[in-house]
Amino acid sequence: MTPTEPLVRGSAAPAAVRPPLPVKMVVAGGFGVGKTTAVGSISEIEPLTTEASITEVAAGVDDLTHTPRKTTTTVAMDFGCLTIDPTLKLYLFGTPGQERFGFMWDDIVEGAVGGLVIVDTRRLDDCYAAVDHFEHRDIPFAVAVNAFDGRVEHTLDEVRWALDVPDGVPVVVFDARDRGSVRDALLVVLELALARTEL
Amino acid sequence: MVMADGATGPDPVGPAPAVRPFLVTAGRVADDGSGRALPLETQVVATAEGLAVLAGLSFERYDIVDACRLPQSLAELAARLRLHLNVVRVLAEDLREAGQLAVYVPDAGASRDASVLRRLIDGLKAVPDSRGVPSDTD
């Protein structure tokens, strides 16, 4: 598959270089769990930071109308990329962690091939929002427990139980600093996405 | 500024711009309700026409066309030019309408296309780990 035809008005011809098809994966999780480290481990460029807008839905418990109040927040977002071949390029976007319940990052996850939720077992609750979001948006995702200092505080079954992730969601241990480890965690997500296309 | 991981690091974008984003875009916003904003990974590349008139472009428009001699994503462009993503979105649309920038909106179906996924998997498997060992040799 190739990108859609360029939207160029008039007779102007694009410059010689035809861009690759970009495919996006989302790396999510709470603050400081290693998202940027993981992106940097596999990216062919130093991770870049840009400002993006996310829409937050404030879930007020005393709001009897059940009408979410939306606010737009500008956040810093780190990302990197990996050229698969001249026609295909993988982008990895690290989504900012948010502790608030019920936020949306539609701007970032729209069209994503899959997601990786990075978990620090010392702070499991930091990643609930990311898990919820991928589930809600029906985006294939895996949970990757970042083994800080090579140690994991809980077994994977305990993590699965604590996060209440469905059986179909892989839970793996990885090291965000290690390129091969990040690569293998991303492969788990891609295999999951591929399996879905064959249902 | 607060980094994506929550750490307060050195500001990667330098001093705050003196000009607010809505002034750069003459008050327009990227998502004006008429449709979806361009995805972050949308690829943009300067057209021959854009490069031909480069010297006549000003400020951000010059920077964008100049930076797009090679294709890149809107996200990369925003990061490298230190512009807000939504500013880049609006200006990219302007430059496209002027025929100075080719904008390749990614195919929404690509992320569920098995052939694309297989190419990604094969390509990623070939990436060596820190010791130089690709994934598919073990």
Image: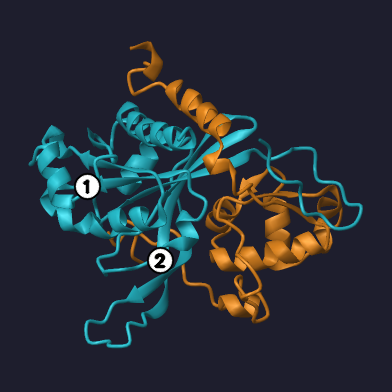
Chain colours: A cyan, B orange
Tell me the chain of label 2.
A
Residue B47's disc number: none
Give the number of the disc on residue A75.
Answer: 2
Residue sitting nearer the eye, B24 or B39: B39
Q: Nearer the viewer, residue B112 or A4?
A: B112
Q: Position of residue A180 (x, y in %)?
A: 33, 26
Q: Residue at x 8, y 41 (%)?
A: A154
Where residue B28 sits: x, y (%)? 65, 78
Kindly identify the residue that appears in the image at 35 percent across and 32 percent down: A188
Residue ID at (27%, 69%): A101
Q: Nearer the viewer, mark 1 or mark 2?
A: 1
Q: Residues within 10 Å of mark 1 (few under 14, many from 20)?
A: many
Q: Is residue A88 left or right of residue B122?
A: right
Residue A124, can we see it? yes
Using the image as rendered, state which of residue B117 and residue B66 is in the foreground.
B117
Mark 2 neighbour class, 10 Å CA radius: few under 14, some 14 to 19, many 20 or more? some
The amino acid type of the residue labelled 1 equals: Val
On the question of residue B134 being in view, the answer is no
Q: Which residue is mark 1?
A: A119
- The residue nearer to you, when weighing B116 against B70, is B116
